[in-house]
Amino acid sequence: MESVTCWQYSPSRLAKLGFGALATVPHVTLNDGNTIPQLGFGVFQIPPAETERAVLHALTVGYRHIDTAEMYGNERDVGDAIRSFGVDRGEVYITSKLNNGFHRPDDARRAFERTLEALGFEYVDLFLIHWPLPTLYDGDFVSTWQALEEFRADGRARSIGVSNFQVAHLRLLAAETETVPAVNQFELHPYFQNRDVAAYGREHGIATEAWAPLAQAKVLDDSTLTRIAERCSKTTAQVVLRWHVQRGNIVFPKSVTPERIAENFAIFDFELGADDMAAVDGLDRGEAGRDGPDPDTFAYILD
Ligand code: NDP
């Protein structure tokens, strides 16, 4: 007989845990002592004209962490949404990323200033090298990282990290530079669990940020996930996001659909048991499950 392993928290248990409407999102402590909300809102592929409305809705639902990038072309709209919502800057965690065409340290300095200017804020909470681009810039992302160390030292980036770094790239940074990245943001979802990169992060105090946490919706019809979702009276998206959170991953699902934005936030009133967690772990397809580009060969520069 299948054991029931999905625990719904009662309102009184939630109250005991100290969860109010806005206080439901746990925070992860990074290796520099700063904290980051474990659930945020991603804005990749949201056209600039739609971004302010989507971010405003996310803030209304309770999200306080937005993940953007210069490459997404919507940093300005993210800033506008935060200002028009009227919340203090310090209450929203903002991440942005260095655009691929600007890895040389002087270019990185200019690109970072552009990001702050577009957002309209004096600092970001987290700034990342978006891609390592090991086949460009003579493979040199070390000097790029040293520019990010300056942004952290002068307080304009509260934390710094990397994105799409493979184990070899992380090892090179460790050998050549002083600062361990606070996070590595890379593709991770049930079909591609990227276990070697995640394990390196765990061993070296680098928090895992899972991009495309829903595999851009490609996992949502999976029969294992739909079975768990039915038993928990949750959606498959909620089950996947809950799995991420219980594995310790930081996630920021993207949606332009108001109901989904709210649905993706409602994942803190239930818990998956060990057998359901193991069932989702078992969906990993290794490298065959990768949906996005391979960081070892990716060399895209936006014109
Ligand atoms: P996601 O895994 O978040 O999936 C987004 C897709 O899933 C959209 O098509 C959305 O549709 C759909 N969706 C969202 N919620 C639901 C739901 N509850 N039910 C059904 N469908 C749903 O993919 P992303 O690639 O957007 O990844 C999330 C974030 O990660 C990005 O926005 C970005 O911030 C970051 N990222 C970083 C990268 C990097 O290189 N560092 C690369 C890629 C992403 P709809 O919008 O129509 O509702």
Image (cartoon, rainbow, N blue to C red):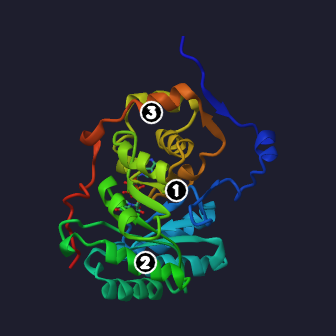
Q: Residue at x 45, y 28 (%)?
A: 279
* Marks 1 and 3 close (CB-CB < 8 Å): no
Query: Gap between marks 1 and 3, in whole Å?
Result: 23 Å
Q: Nearer the viewer, residue 237 or 49?
A: 237
Pointer 3 residue: 280
Q: Position of residue 147 (x, y in %)?
A: 39, 81
Judge whether residue 201 can be spotted in this image.
yes
Q: Nearer the viewer, mark 1 or mark 3?
A: 3
CB of residue at label 1: within 8 Å of ligand 1?
A: yes
For badge 1, the amino acid type reads Ile
**Nearer the N terminus, badge 1 or badge 3?**
1
For badge 3, the amino acid type reads Val
- Residue 178 figure quarter: bottom left
Q: Nearer the viewer, residue 244 or 75?
A: 244
Pointer 1 residue: 261
Query: Gap between marks 3 and 2, in whole Å?
Result: 36 Å
For badge 2, the amino acid type reads Leu
Q: Residue at x 46, y 65 (%)?
A: 181
* Ligand 1's quadrant: bottom left
- Residue 75 figure quarter: bottom left
Pointer 2 residue: 148
Q: Is residue 285 above or below residue 56?
A: above
Q: What label does residue 150 carry, if any? A: none
**SS for tag 1?**
helix
**SS for tag 2?**
helix
Q: Residue at x 33, y 77 (%)?
A: 143
CB of residue at label 3: within 8 Å of ligand 1?
A: no
**SS for tag 3?**
helix
Q: Position of residue 231 (x, y in %)?
A: 55, 27
